[in-house]
Image (cartoon, grey):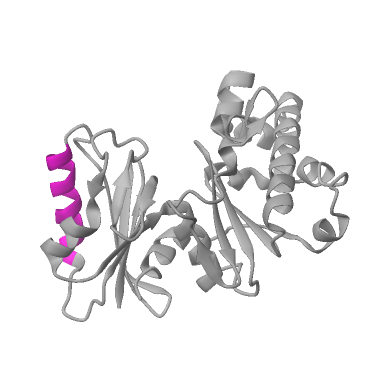
Amino acid sequence: MTIGVDLGGTNIRAGIIAKGSIIVQRHTSLKNKDSLPESLTQFIEFIAPLIQPDIKGIGIGVPSVVDIDKGIVYNVVKIPSWEKVELKDILQKEFKIPVYVNNDVNCFVLGEHQYGLAKPFKSVVGLTIGTGLGSGIIINNQLYSGNNCGAGEIGYLPYRDENFEYYCSSSFFESKHNTTALKAYQDASDGNSEAFNIWNEFGLHIGNAVKAVVYTYDPEAIILGGSIAKAYEFFAGEMRKALVDCYFPESIKRLKILQSKNENITLLGAAALVH
């Protein structure tokens, strides 16, 4: 058995995993995020009840650039005090078992590849669409993180007058349309034509992001996750229209674009880091 931890900017989820199934799960909100000692103490105390003699190790997904070998996390999203935290060493000293740390989107795509929609594919990219635009990469059945765990960050690629993240995340709704993704989703669900137009425009931008992924990695599949991906039905049509002029039509023809359905997939992927 292993422990998987999904550390979000606001909430923490953790569970004991055995053969791809969650045996025990718990969650909490991280408090005192401006204080490293206090937030770390809470984090440790949250994990502690899951520790058992037959636990092989702990895998943690973090919204941050990560030094995978040393288990150091840098500038964790929405946790200002977590800058250059030696998370692996701290937890290994505390619990006396192996600890593995990686970026949360890498854990998302790893979870999908081992236990979810990406199991049939050797090469797959996971895109998480929410407050930001994140991506994780599987190449030849192996997680590819790059030299500094920064591989696949297409959100930072220049796009139009900003970058892909600006147009393919919550920023698009807030900055371009003075609304939120949730409000646009609710309005579209109620049949609001203006909301449909917003989602159509968003779909165009997501389609162009997908083309950037195809040009860079040419994967067999792209798995869409994150809070905004739940509105897939409203932007999928325009997204696919944007792929028509792709320079690699055969890649688009064979490409599978799938919406993640498992709320626990990042947790499972974090547990899968343990080896």
Taking the image as drawn, is residue 62 in sight? no
Tell me which secondary structure the magenta stretch mostly adopts.
helix
Check residue 68 for magenta coloring.
Answer: no
| Along the viewing direction, whichever of 171 and 250 lies nearer the viewer | 250
Q: Compared with residue 153, is residue 2 higher up or lower down, i.e. above or below?
A: below
Q: Compared with residue 267, is residue 35 higher up or lower down, i.e. above or below?
A: above
Q: Residue 69: x percent and y percent?
A: 33, 61
| Along the viewing direction, whichever of 13 and 206 lies nearer the viewer | 206
Q: Residue 166: x percent and y percent?
A: 59, 29
Number of residue marks: 0
Quadrant of the rendered structure where residue 231 is? top right
Taking the image as drawn, is residue 79 in sight? yes
Check residue 41 for magenta coloring.
Answer: yes
Farthest residue toward the front? 147
| Along the viewing direction, whichever of 235 and 220 lies nearer the viewer | 220
Report the residue at 53% width, 44% height from top: 227
Magenta residues (range): 36-49
Report the residue at 14% width, 55% height from top: 45
Q: Compared with residue 65, is residue 138 higher up or lower down, i.e. above or below?
A: below
| Quadrant location of the C terminus in the rendered image | bottom left
Report the residue at 38% width, 68% height from top: 273
